[in-house]
Amino acid sequence: MIVIPGPASKELGAKIASELGVEPHFAEYRVFPDGESYIRLTRAVEGETAVIVQTTAPMQDRKLMQLYMMASTAKELGARRVVCVVPYLAYSRQDKRFLDGEALSLELVIGILESLGVDDIIVVDIHNEESMRTIQSRHNLKVHNLSAIPVLAGELRDKGFEGAYSLSPDKGAVKLAEAASKILGGRYGFFEKFRDRNTGEIEMKVVDLDVEGESAIVFDDIVSSGGTMAKAVEGLKGQGAERVAAACTHALFMEGVEEKIEKAGADIIMASDTLCPPKGVTTVSVAPLVANLLRKLTTSKKRVQ
Ligand code: R5P
């Protein structure tokens, strides 16, 4: 197995290689002054399983182009199998046509990777697994979805949040809270969130959660502008929760988000390393999870589902 960390995931790619006990073969890259990318694979891949590690945000479009260049080059140079580890898969929130005429962006990204000859994609906490499965059923590659939630919950348990109330910001993400509660041993539930599809404005209903004096954690797949997380944390603190943690898999964290969530009352902010969280955010790694799946994929004779 040849592990190729791409420009967007040098650190994570190296960690995955180290978990597997192999050398990472970093792709050489440049960005020309006009914005185009140059990519060169630095190790022969003929007859091998090429594992390309490249997250895709931000700048999503450039990172995707670099991913396409690495995958197509590996295939053209004779890789037997091409596995793309894309821990944060850009455009996965646009997995449906919510308004007439919208681009079905996730399908486009998956379709391009398929057309390049990619055999497997490994993602972490894809926004909506069901929609992704529907899209995948129209394609010939396999998408494997891992979850960082048990790792985040385990770390929070070690930091004194055992028995905490696990919450997700909306009903769609309640599976995250449920998975976390299995590790933390407390209750789980969700807020009611509404997003105006035209303006993007969020409205969050904070029902009475009976959290006075308790610890609570908000788990989300993505924190981007931080609006969702800040509203949830604020709601919990407003109801008297004693300690509140904000945890997410993908720390997109636009400018000022950490401060926004802290100001809302979060006692700890935690994220996985599918992206590069800012310094003040406690980070847990998905490298062992990814390495474990890669081991299974490359040793199993049967296709891993
Ligand atoms: C949306 O449904 C996602 O699960 C996240 O809740 C959302 O992307 C967070 O976005 P923001 O941080 O901009 O509120």
Image (cartoon, rainbow, N blue to C red):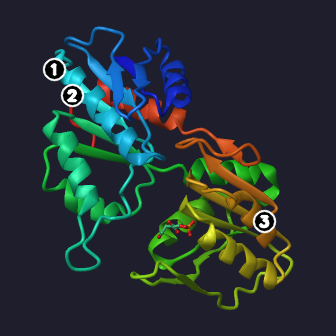
| Res 86 → quadrant | top left
Residue 152: image x %, image y %? 63, 51
In the image, what residue type sits under mark 1? Answer: Glu
Pointer 3 or 2: first along the chain: 2
Residue at image mark 1: 76
Q: Given this view, does label 3 or label 2 mark the residue nearer the observer?
A: 2
What is the crowding at mark 3: few (fewer than 14 residues within 10 Å), some, or many (at least 20)?
A: many
In the image, what residue type sits under mark 2? Answer: Ser
In the image, what residue type sits under mark 3? Answer: Ala
Mark 2 C-beta closer than 8 Å to ligand 1: no
Q: Secondary structure at mark 3?
A: loop
| Res 273 → quadrant | top right
Residue at image mark 3: 266
106 over 19 or under it: above or below = below
Residue 97: image x %, image y %? 25, 73
Residue 213: image x %, image y %? 86, 78
> Are the residues flagged by discs 2 and 1 in contact, CB closer than 8 Å?
yes
Q: Which residue is rendered at x = 52% and y = 77% of the image?
A: 170
Pointer 3 or 1: first along the chain: 1
Q: Which residue is rendered at x = 36% and y = 58% of the image?
A: 92
Residue at image mark 2: 72
